[in-house]
Amino acid sequence: MPASPIRKLVPLANKAKERGITVYHLNIGQPDLPTPEIALDAVRQLNRKILEYSPSEGIKSYREKLVKYYDKFNIDVTADDIIITTGGSEAVLFSFMACLDPGDEIIVPEPAYANYMAFAISAGAIIKTLPSSINEGFALPSVENFEALITERTRGILICNPNNPTGYLYTQKEMNQIRDLVKKYDLFLFSDEVYREFCYTGAPYISAFHLKGIENNVILIDSVSKRYSECGIRIGALITKNKEVRQNVMKFCQARLSPPLIGQLIAEASLDAPEEYMLDTYNEYVERRKFLIDGLNRIPGCYSPIPMGAFYTVAKLPVDDADDFCAWCLEHFEYEGQTVFMAPASGFYTTPGLGKNEVRIAYVLKKEDLAKALVVLEKALEAYPGRIL
C-alpha cells in the first residue's frame, strides 16, 4: 500500500508549526471557501430523536434530488442508477471491488490521484499507467499507447476529468478516443468527475455519460467534498446504468451497512444552495488560478502549464529531487517565519523516475496567502542546496 504523497509529510509540517512557523498548505485539496449556509443550517436545525441507519444505497429523497442536479449537466440518470457512498473514495474502491477480480488490469493516464493505486491494491487489481507529459500540458496519450497496454486481463480505463493532480480537462476528441477504445475492447470506463463545476475553457462540460454507445460500460464517481467545501461529511456517489455492476456494488454497501446519515442530510440540503454560491466559488478559483500560474511562471526555472479545470496544477521546479525539496522546506527552511507545504509529484506516478522535479500545488488559499506562499517558494528555491542552475 503506497504512502499518500499528499499527507506523508504532515508530521514535518506539524513540527514546523510547533516551532512557530506559518505553513502555507498547498499540498491538499481542502478548500478554504465557506460551506453553503443552507448546509450549515441543516446541521443547526437537526431535530431527530434517533440517528438511525440509512439505506445501504443511500436516502431515496437525496438520490431523487441528485437526478435533477445531474440533469442540469445533461446527464440522464434515475435514482436507481445512483448509489450513495462514504465519499468519492469509497465509490472508487467499491467500483473496483465489484468489477475487477484479483489480477485484472486497468489503464490509467499518469500522473494520477495517488489513492487510485491504493484502491486497486485493495481490490487485488493491477494499474497500468500511461505517462502524459508536462511539456504537452498533460494531454491524453495516443490511442496507440493505450492499445499497447491492453492484454487479455484488461478490464477498464480510469480517468479523472477535470484531472487531479494536473488540472487537465479532456477535449471532445480525447473523450471520443476513450469511448472508441471502451467499445472496441468492451472495457469499463471508470470516470471520476468530482470537479465538474470547475471547468475554465468555456466549452461544454463533457461527461462519460455523454458518450454514445457505451452507456452500460460507464461507472461515474462523484463527491460533494470539493463542490460545497464539505470534505469532512464524506458523501460521494457511484452512478451506473449497469444493473449487474450495481448488484455487485450493493453487496459491499450492505457489508458496510450505510453511508453517513448526517452527511447525507447536509448534502441533500446543499443541492438548494443558491446559484450565486457556485458562481462566486467558480469566479474565485478562476482568479486564484491566474494569480498562481502567473506567479509560478515568473519564478526563475519554474514552469506550470495553464490548468483548465479543478483547482490543482503540477509545476516543474529547478531542483534535483522534489521529494527532498518538499521535506527540506518543512524541516530546514523558513523565510520571515513562513514556509510552504507542497505534494511531491513523484507520488502521483508509478513509472520510476517520473515527477522527480515536479510538485502538485492546490490553489485553495486566498490570493493574499498565495502571494506570500509564492515569495516563500522563490526564496526556498534560491536557498535549496539541490537547486539546478
Image (tube, rainbow, N blue to C red):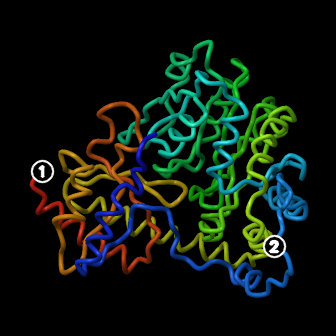
Q: Percent from the top left, x then y, of residue 41?
A: 74, 85
**Total marks drawn?**
2
Q: Percent from the top left, x then y, of residue 145?
A: 49, 21
The answer to whether 38 is drawn above or below residue 180 in the figure is: below
- In the image, 5: left or right of 229? left
Dot 2 surroundings within 10 Å: few (below 14), some, or many (20 or more)? few
The answer to whether 241 is drawn above or below residue 28 in the figure is: above
Classify residue 106 by image quadrant. top right
Q: Distance between the residues labelled 2 and 1?
A: 55 Å
Residue 51 image label: 2
Q: Label 2, secondary structure: give it.
A: loop
Residue wearing tag 1:
386
The answer to whether 381 is drawn above or below residue 190 in the figure is: below
- In the image, 340: left or right of 166? left
Which one is nearer the viewer's eye here, 273 or 24? 24
- In the image, 177: left or right of 27? right
Query: Which residue is located at x 50 percent, y 61 percent?
Result: 311
The residue type indicated by label 1 comes to Gly
Query: Which residue is located at x 40 percent, y 34 percent?
Result: 350
Q: Percent from the top left, x then y, of residue 129?
A: 48, 30
Classify residue 217 by image quadrant. top right
The residue type indicated by label 2 comes to Leu
- Name the mark nearer the viewer: 2 or 1: 2
Q: Label 1, secondary structure: give it.
A: loop
Chain-order first, disc 2 or disc 1: 2
